[in-house]
Amino acid sequence: MLNKLAPQLARLFFSSFPYQNGKWTLWRIYKNLFSKAQFKKGTYNTNHGFKLNLESERYIEKFIYYWGEWEGNETYFIKKFLPKDGIFIDIGANIGYFTCLAASVVGNKGHVFSFEPVPQSFQLLAKNIYLNDFHNVTAHQIAASNKKGSMLLAKPKNPCALEMVSTRNASTTKPHWETPSERIDEIVDSNQSIDMIKIDIEGAEMLALTGLFKHLSKTPAPIVLCEVNDSFLNEMGGSAEKLMAHMINLGYSNIYRFNKNRLSIFDGVTTNYKTLQENIIFSKNPLNDDDPSRH
């Protein structure tokens, strides 16, 4: 009985209680105490004005059910710096949380280009776009890369690990999907002014960035919110240091990281790139994160 009630009560607390101090500790305790508790699959409102179909025990869906959002710092950043009527590119859209968030921010006169190659994730992405009646989203079941062709994506043994699907450990000897790949420059007209790009593709970020060369070389250029995981990048023949150098060479001289709910300048001198595993913000212009409510 308690395992049935616990998810509902926990959702009410984690998604609604305004104070952040101690919530992560309570979250860890809750997961340990009620590891077998499962939330009821269905359609749920997020804390940001859109709904999502949550259909499995994948961590991203479970987290959104309980907290009403995914990656709070990144959510805040997109809501603050993505302009109304703007254009957003979501590379590695997964079930569509950031796609739907951006679509709600830019409004009907803006547009979102969404890319997700994993079949199950793309199906849920499409469902969530339809659920919210977003007509300002174009979704592509395609992998962002540095060239037109195809890529192999390893199928995880555990279906709850779909958000970790990657081309890093895919091979013809293991279960995999084969998906079309393309340069985003060839899909999104380089004459369009892109405001922001989010990239989270499990180590293939350099491929996507190379395929965005036309957009990233422009001035003004889009802000880029990119996962940088040195270990994952290494498996694809790159590194965090090479990715940073690539962006700096393109003119992205303002680099930030999240530090206790606010932006801080990324210090490339003192940072240990070998252990880097976080979302980094790249901008050609300084960003003002002057919001006392977040500090």
Image (cartoon, rainbow, N blue to C red):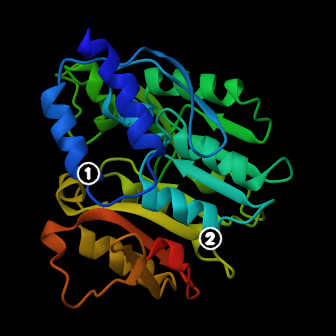
- Quadrant where the C terminus sits is bottom left
Counting labels gives 2
| Percent of width and height locating residue 34 | 19, 24
**Eyeballing the image, is 97 above or below 111?**
above
Q: Residue at x 43, y 31 (%)?
A: 65
Whole-Å distance between the Cαs marked 2 and 1?
A: 32 Å
Decide if residue 131 is on the left or right side of residue 288. right
> For residue 82, what is the image quadrant?
bottom right
Q: Which residue is nearer to you in this view: 94 or 188?
A: 94
Is residue 116 something that shows in the picture?
yes
Decide if residue 63 is on the left or right side of residue 195. left
**Eyeballing the image, is 130 above or below 210?**
above
Is label 1 in a helix, a strand or a loop? Answer: helix
Which callout, 2 or 1, points at the residue further toward the start of the chain?
A: 1
**Eyeballing the image, is 227 above or below 250?**
above
| Percent of width and height locating residue 24 | 26, 51
Q: Residue furthest bottom?
A: 269
Q: Which mark is residue 222?
A: 2
Q: Which residue is nearer to you in this view: 195 or 26?
A: 26
Q: Residue furthest right?
A: 109
Is label 2 in a helix, a strand or a loop? Answer: loop
- On the image, numbered disc 1 is attached to which residue? 24
Q: Residue furthest top?
A: 1
Q: Which residue is nearer to you in this view: 277 or 40?
A: 40
| Percent of width and height locating residue 111 | 75, 50
The residue under label 1 is which amino acid type?
Answer: Trp
* Residue count near mark 2 (Cα–Cα under 10 Å), binned few <14, some 14–19, many ≥20: many
> For residue 84, what is the image quadrant?
bottom right
Q: Residue at x 57, y 43 (%)?
A: 47
The residue under label 2 is which amino acid type?
Answer: Pro
- Quadrant where the N terminus sits is top left
Q: Residue at x 50, y 81 (%)?
A: 250
